[in-house]
Image (cartoon, grey):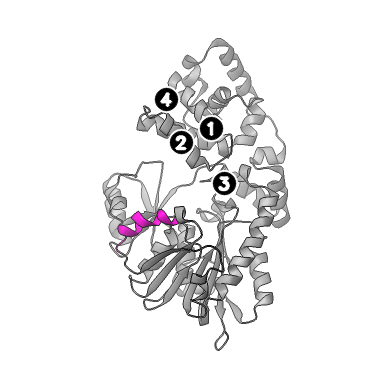
Amino acid sequence: MTLRRNQLVALAGAIERVARLDMPADAALSAFFREHAEMGARDRALVSDGAFAYLRRKASLEALAQTREPHLLAYAVAVREPGHSVRDIEPAVNAADARWLAGFKGRMHDVLAPAVAADVPDWLWHRLGESHDDKARASLTRAWQSPAPLDLRANTMKTTRDAALAALSADDLRVARTPYSPLGLRIDGRPSLARHPWLGDGRLEVQDEGSQLVGLLVAPRRSDMVVDFCAGAGGKTLLLGALMRSQGRLYAFDVSAKRLARLTPRLARSGLSNVHPQVIANERDAKVKRLAGKIDRVLVDAPCTGFGTLRRNPDLKWRQTPEDLAELTAKQAKILAAAATLVKPEGRLVYATCSVLPEENDAIVDAFLAQHDAFAERDVAALLADMRISLDTGSRLRLRPDVHGCDGFFAAVLERKQGER
């Protein structure tokens, strides 16, 4: 597919914008497209895909390109990504850039330093090496270099997975059931579904399979009182509400009113009436304290580095630092301890992150259990087996994109012992 000059210029502009790393990449691209409202949908998709490809392969692209000049990086992305060749862009470049392009093509298979070849910062490469063997680290970072598939969840308040599968297949979409979540569907390729009627009316929600599995581990019953402690935009909240069949009471807590506001339209089309979004000032808010010891199920989807989602959010690996990690682990410990106060005897507490780093996962749970003998851990593999989900990652949920095909997630299931307050 031959690329036009204006497409390459737009891609260069988008790369320059996201390369600042001063905000999340999706927000930076939204701002860029607002400034270029004349662009059509097809060009926007090309530019968006190219900008994210740059972020996924930033270290190796810049090393092989031997420059950070946006317009040259746009050429580098174009010829390195599948579907394009040098011939596709040569008509749109001048003689000097054509000579540079020939040099870049000659360097494309040069040997790079391990972290650069893996497209992660040095500190993260070394940190992964402390918790993964060489083969696992290479496999994981290689998975991060490719885009993620599109996962959907069938909203069982309005439809079934099989009905959704049939409808999407009838639209000539390449769709299959997710291998583990009984609610999930995976779309092959990069189709635009933003205006699909099943997403518009709430029969389907965009949600990664790993996120669905975390919600299923909460296993709320219809009459339960449930708290999603860090609800964000409410993806897991909506799943929990559907599992409860819109009965009981489900609180969606978050410290960000802006994030919770994104739940409002999703909630309106979900068919749920048992969800109560509430902004809290912090983990010790009065709204939290008044529910102490009263809650049957609590989900803590803790704020984290998000490194399990680097296929979707590649900017995170360049924006996060070791100092950020230290701040997050301190916050995670505080949030888990506060959320635990809500759980009634025999109630369940699920701690989860979309990270693959042990500091955010096992270390937080192990430290909590050492300080809270009122809680005992449940075996995740056994819980999944009870739900007829054929997935065994050990006593704790450990999902990786290279192994399981979904985002990287961690979860541990804790229960307050009978008679313990």
Disc 4 is placed on an element classified as loop
Is 173 covered by the magenta stretch? no
Mark 1 Cα within 10 Å, few/some/many (few <14, many 20+)?
some
In the shown orientation, is residue 147 left or right of residue 138? Answer: left
Disc 2 is placed on an element classified as helix
Instruction: Write down the region rendered in magenta.
Output: 260-271
Q: Quadrant of the C terminus?
A: bottom right
Do the residues bearing badges 1 and 2 touch, measured as CB atoms within 8 Å?
A: yes
Q: Earlier in the sequence, mark 1 or mark 4?
A: 4
Do the residues bearing badges 3 and 4 touch, measured as CB atoms within 8 Å?
A: no
Name the outermost residue toward the bottom: 419
Measured Cα–Cα span from mark 2 to mark 4? 27 Å
Q: Which residue is mark 4?
A: 1
Q: Earlier in the sequence, mark 2 or mark 4?
A: 4
Q: In the drawing, what numbered circle is on residue 17?
A: 1
The nearer-to-camera label among 1 and 4 is 1
Q: Earlier in the sequence, mark 3 or mark 4?
A: 4
- Residue type at tag 3: Ala
Q: Which residue is mark 3?
A: 143
Mark 2 Cα within 10 Å, few/some/many (few <14, many 20+)?
few
Q: Earlier in the sequence, mark 1 or mark 2?
A: 1
- Residue type at tag 1: Arg
For the point 65% across and 47% down, the residue is: 138
State the image coordinates of residue 364 (x, y, percent, origin top left).
Answer: 65, 66
Q: Earlier in the sequence, mark 3 or mark 1?
A: 1
Disc 3 is placed on an element classified as helix
The nearer-to-camera label among 3 and 1 is 1
- Residue type at tag 2: Ala
Measured Cα–Cα span from mark 3 to mark 4? 26 Å
Compared with 205, 73 (above or below) is above
Measured Cα–Cα span from mark 1 to mark 4? 25 Å
Q: Which residue is mark 2?
A: 31
